[in-house]
Image (cartoon, helix red, strand yellow):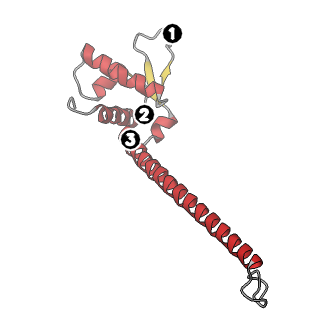
Amino acid sequence: MDDLKPIDELDYYLELLRKRNDIATITMIIAFSGKEYSVDEYFRVRRIIDKFLRDKMVFEIPDIPGRLQPDPSYQMTYEGLLFHGYRKQSEIDEMNHVIFVHNEKRIVRNEKWLNRGTWTASIVGVMLLLWQIFLYFYPVHADYPYFFWQK
């Protein structure tokens, strides 16, 4: 468990809280994970819980008067229950980034071809116009139509 990457550790504790789906304190979470309680472990789990709070995966239950535990309690939210995990979200974000980069390249490529096509069409149009002007002023013979629609 100690050799887990931070993202896998987040998924581990998220799954632990999801399975319990009950009110839990940090010391209870440490006990559920099967680890020995220590100050370092407490603050490590506290940082993980703070991350869950920022992501709205858990919510903090306010202190109940007369409760003996000074440790705040936490419970999963529906968003936390439905969340598919930080590892999976990382893969989805990476895939979305790859798709975004691919789409940007395709947009740039299409813009280049659209620009080339526009210039080609304008050059051909100008050449056709000049050809028609040439035929108007210098007809080859009298029966020759000046414009292509006069056949």
Estimate the x, y position of residue 37 in percent, counting from the top left.
25, 18
Placement of 147 over or under 115, stated as above or below:
below
Q: Which residue is mark 2?
A: 21
For discs 1 and 2, the disc positioned in front in the rendered view: 2
The mark found on residue 65 in the picture is 1
Placement of 56 over or under 104, stated as above or below:
above
Q: Please give left or right for residue 81 compared with residue 45 in the image.
A: right
Q: Give the SS element for disc 2.
A: loop
Q: Measure how far apart labels 1 and 3 are at the Cα level.
A: 40 Å
Q: Quadrant of the N terminus?
A: top left
Q: Which residue is mark 3?
A: 90
Q: Measure how far apart labels 3 and 2 are at the Cα level.
A: 24 Å
Placement of 86 over or under 52, stated as above or below:
below
Q: Is residue 39 visible?
A: yes
How crowded is the residue under tag 1: few (<14 C-alpha within 10 Å), some, or many (20+)? few
Amino acid type assigned to the residue bearing label 2 in the image: Asn
Which is more toward the observer, 34 or 138?
138
Task: Residue at 36% x, 37% y: name it.
Answer: 15
Q: Quadrant of the C terminus?
A: bottom right
Q: Which quadrant of the figure has residue 89?
A: top left
Q: Give the SS element for disc 1.
A: loop
Q: Mark 1 touching mark 3, by CB under 8 A? A: no
Which is more toward the observer, 63 or 41?
41
Give the mark nearest the N terminus, 1 or 2: 2
Task: Residue at 47% x, 41% y: name it.
Answer: 82
Give the mark nearest the N terminus, 3 or 2: 2
Which is more toward the observer, 24 or 58?
58
How crowded is the residue under tag 2: few (<14 C-alpha within 10 Å), some, or many (20+)? some
Placement of 13 over or under 114, stated as above or below:
above
